[in-house]
Image (cartoon, helix red, strand yellow):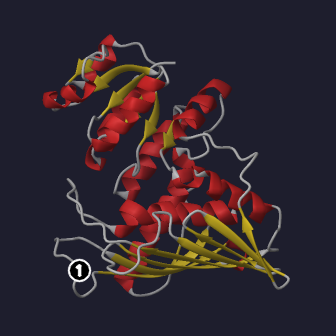
Amino acid sequence: MRAILVGLGAAGFSWYKRLRDQGLLAAVVEVDPAMKEKMNDDPFPFYTSLEEALDKEQVDFLVNVTSPMIHTQVNHAAFDRKLAVLCEKPISFDYEESIEVVTRAARENIPFMIAENYRRFPFIRKMKRLLDDGVIGSLSTMDVQFHRFHQVQRKYTVSVLDDIGVHHFDMLRYFSGREGISVFARLFNPIGGWKEEGAVLNTYAILELEGGIIATYNASIAARGTETSWWGNWRIEGTEGAMELTNKEIRIFRDGETHLTEDLSGIDETDILTEFVASLHQGREAETSGIDYLKTQALVHYAKLASEKGTPITIKVPII
């Protein structure tokens, strides 16, 4: 299989190396011609026009690593050619626009996957297996703590939920196997946080998931104390025990004993690109397809609405 990579910024260059090293790269599209220097003497065609690349290159899929504001334009250009798309998150910052993009892909039977990578870490997949095996019984509550000082320049306004929290909300769905029912949230900037118009640096949220599972979420990208890992610190309570994740360490509390889980053998360690290519070969829906990702984006969308209204909001899971 061969792919066109669109976008050669910081994230795009990481994708460039992955596609190149796996023998999947056919061509690169980047509107800034100066970015071509990153390719050194690599022989891949370089275009500043997506339409020109699509006209000249025969490929199987497109990897969209453009700025979020350009995602929809690039996705539709690929869909016009019936090309499968692997797109960096978000589909769009506009929830309704995201629904429209996913609806089109589904209607036209075009494979569309979002690069939701946190659930693919081997220790995360180990936790999922343990939870599914009932090691701590049935899930009761889930608590996520995420604290970092993460002030970086972007081409868009920073939001802790859009930038990082969407990963954690996806993990809530992944670990529990349940969808959101309702959410109450407060999005704000703390005293002493940096000034950036429209930025949202902190989030507190309480979510109810199917089956009566309650999840609490406390996140900040303006925290000056001890930092958590990017995937956060987790405490999951069950009817027969509890499980905690700190950094990459999984601890199980049951029957008055504590066990550190270190054996990750037998865990599926495939990355996003491997999963996407496998789904194309096998003719199946990818694990974090656009349809699935919309259910995660719904949690973010309704958390924002709940904060604006100051009341709990019922989550309407999109049906495509």
Indicate left or right for 29 with 24 as reference. Answer: left
Residue with the mark numbered 1: 193
Residue at x 83%, y 62% (from the top left corner): 133
The residue closer to the viewer here, 11 or 161, is 11
Residue 301: image x %, image y %?
A: 42, 67
Within the image, what quadrant is residue 58 found in? Answer: top left
Above or below for 3 versus 172? above
Residue at x 62%, y 32% (from the top left corner): 279
Residue at x 24%, y 71% (from the top left corner): 199
The residue closer to the viewer here, 167 or 21, is 21
Q: Residue furthest right?
A: 255
The answer to whether any part of residue 100 appears in the image is: yes
The answer to whether any part of residue 52 appears in the image is: no
Above or below for 286 versus 244? above
Residue at x 61%, y 45% (from the top left corner): 287
The residue closer to the viewer here, 311 or 165, is 165
Mark 1: which secondary structure? loop
**Mark 1 is on which residue type?**
Gly
Residue 304: image x %, image y %?
A: 39, 73
Residue 205: image x %, image y %?
A: 48, 80
